[in-house]
Image (tube, helix red, strand yellow):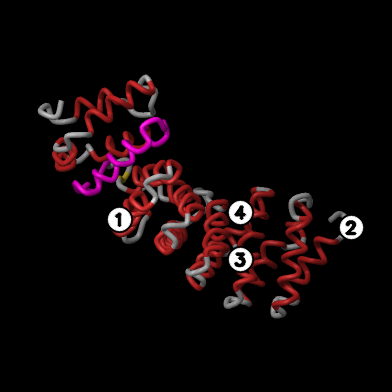
Amino acid sequence: CSCGGASRIISILYNLSGDSKAVCKAFRALSIIIGTCDPLILRNSSAPKSVLRAMETNPTDICIQVRGATTLWNLGSRHSTLQREIIELGGIPTITKAMRNFIASKQMQEKGIIALWSLTVPSLLERAVTSRAIEAIADAIAAHITTVKICEHGLGALSTLATSKSMVNDVENVIDMLFSCMWVNSDSANIQQGALAALSKISIDQPSHQVLKITPADLDVVINSMRSHILVKGVQENALILIRSYTFSPANVNVIGQSPYLLGLIKTAMSNFQGSFRVDVQDLLHLLPSDNQ
């Protein structure tokens, strides 16, 4: 890398961007050295610009799109200045376009989600760009809802990017997708924990505390998650945080209060983990209708 190897490879990406075979070979070579290369060399060689040029020149080549997304992730993880440059050069729209063009490719979706997640810098992201990234990630999960890795990475990215429901286009469909993902992957504690975390952010607007309505069917999904993973603190805690968020709506309190199972699950969680949660469980219990208690 210090002898100019990285600069030559990056130059190939830029100058021969129309040669798909040369670009694929350059991406393969760059992947070998990028982890040990000085970030300053990568930046001075215009690495982000060259990678994005190669991807934009070859939008129908899945090899280039997958390798390009992976390289952007690797570049962004090397230094914050490279991360900033990728964002400012339009890296997120380029990645989401590739994910949309190759929605059936599990590899493209997984690498695209990881790349988007690595570029999550709220202070640099415009709302429209963030919403586009959230939409691409939600579509990836929906298209590959039985693929554990895509769901896990996607839910982690969503819980980081979607800080409130106002950030999400078509929020009700995204929430329906998240509950469906929980049902389909009910045996995966990681997916349950990730989906509950995403729901707790997407379902409510801060600081107004305006919250979406929960249906009895939605509540059944949460209850099933708590029951299936009763000894997993992350699942229990995220479920309690979500339920507490929903109680900002009186209508939701009535729905929650009608469940004959929830109170027992909440008390079991308190007992199993001595109430050491990021939510005041006693306060939550006081908010439930008196006939439930």
The residue indicated by pointer 2 is: 3
Residue 136 placement: quadrant: bottom left
Amino acid type for the residue under numbered disc 2:
Cys
- Side of 153 where 33 appears, left or right: right
Q: Position of residue 171 (x, y in %)?
A: 31, 56
**Residue farthest toward the right in the current orientation of the protein:** 3
What residue is shown at x 61% (from left), y 54% (from top)?
84
Q: Tell me which residue sits at (51%, 67%) in the image.
A: 99
Classify 186 as above or below 19: above
Disc 4: which residue: 84
Q: Which residues are magenta?
A: 209-236
Q: CA distance from mark 3 to mark 2?
A: 28 Å
Tell me where residue 170 appears, x and y as whole percent: 31, 61
Q: Amino acid at mark 1?
A: Asp
* Secondary structure at numbered mark 1: helix
- Check if mark 1's residue and mark 2's residue have beta carbons within 8 Å: no
